[in-house]
Amino acid sequence: MFFKWLKHYMPRSLYGRAALILVLPVVLLQLVVSFGLITRHFEGVTEQMTQAVTREVFLVLEGLDAVETVPEALPIILDTLEMSIDYVDQLETQDTRVWYDFSAFIISREFKRYLPGVTAVQLAEKGRVNLFMQRPEGNLVVRFDRRRVSASNSHQLFVNMVFFGALLTFVAYLYLRNQLRPIKRLAAAAEAFGRGQNVPYSPGGAVEVRAAGSAFLDMRARIERQIEQRTLLLSGVSHDLRTPLTRFKLGVSLLEDEDREPLEKDIEEMQLMLDAFLSFARGVYEDENDLVDAVAFVQAIVDDFKRTDAPVAIHEIQGSGQISLRPATARRAIENLIGNAVRYANRAEVSVQITDRYLRVRVEDDGPGIPAEFHDEALKPFARLEPARNQNKGMGVGLGLSIAADVARAHGGILRLGKSERLGGLRADLVLGRTESHRA
């Protein structure tokens, strides 16, 4: 629970999380090793080298004290130690260093600890150390090479750590990518099957991934058999019922008008039920994906309804572009939503919204609507909620919304029901997902 807030900052993809698991320990290990090496090894080396130079500076100061008795000693000492001294009028009191020179703190500390009279240690000049000291005979500055107080090749260890750490991380990433590739193939096959596409897939990768892939293939085969059996069952029943229904039509046609009209109405309703059964039995996968203009596609469906004097109109269009979908099944879903709207209401309006991620077709009406507690029930096959709707418009078989929901899922979307704020009736949002290759 304490680390729950970290979820917002963690990668979402499997690649990102695997890379984080791989890179984070390597980076932390390098930081720990670097910190330990700097604080123990390089700090100790710098201290020892600075203390050695301190003793040499003491030797130079002794030469200054003996310059009156042995004048030739001081130049020899300076040449041997590769140092130089100069007297200055103004002593510096502020230490200077380059911003990335962390060893300068150690050098300044050691000089001021062991050399009395040191006022400033300036290390900003590249490759040189300027040591300002206050002496009885005057203010002087001692200059010598920076390499004498700190290791000159300390950066090589860090370069090697960074280079080989990055190299090994890259090699591990290549191996990890090969291990994750079968998982991505399995996810792609499962997603495609959810959209009604049967893409070729064979299990691969580690033993666990192969087991998951084999289980997916078994599940896909069982679902395909179930769909096939359901389709054959409904198709067979609907087809067998057409024969007695035809005989009913012939027999009713011989009756008088007063007796014939109610029977013909019942026969027509039975015919509509059979058509709905066949439409549901065909499912949502009988046609292939095609690239269509979304606005023109919805406008054509609305125009077809207008030709039958249906009270439907386009309310609003946002965006434009083409979308990859199954035209026949998508048309059936939109027609079902508009048909329900004009059946149970006096007016229906259609709105279209196109974004980079989805196509939304909204159908609103001014009818009685469906209570919120019945929205999930209304999406189930053969669900009939006539108490919440107007029965004077006729009775359906409860497949219109179910087929529309199946079509939405097959296109990577969803069907949402709600209350229309403008018209007061039902609001149905058919959301169809857009693939990366067809985003406008």
Image (tube, rainbow, N blue to C red):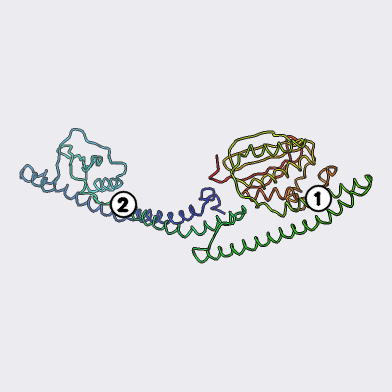
Mark-to-mark CA distance, 1 and 2? 81 Å
Residue 127 lies in what quarter of the image?
top left
Q: Where is residue 393 in the image (x, y as percent from the top left)?
A: 83, 42
Q: Quadrant of the N terminus?
A: bottom right
The residue labelled by disc 1 is: 271
Query: Considering depth in this image, is 19 or 312 the residue closer to the camera?
Result: 312
Residue 118, picture quadrant: top left
Q: Are marks 1 and 2 in contact (CB under 8 Å)?
A: no
What is the secondary structure assignment of the residue under circle 2?
helix
x and y percentages locating residue 278 in the rendered image: 74, 53
Residue drawn at 24 percent across, 49 percent down: 150
State the residue in front, 381 or 134.
Answer: 381
Where in the figure is residue 134, as x and y percent of width and height? Answer: 20, 39
Residue located at (71% from left, 50% from top): 403
Mark 2, residue position:
159
Callout 1: SS: helix
Q: Nearer the viewer, residue 390 or 298?
A: 298
From the viewer's perspective, tell me whether residue 77 is left or right of residue 172: left
Numbered marks: total? 2
399 relative to 343, above or below? below
**Residue at 75%, 45% in the rendered image:** 372
Q: Earlier in the sequence, mark 1 or mark 2?
A: 2
What amino acid type is highlighted by mark number 2?
Answer: Val
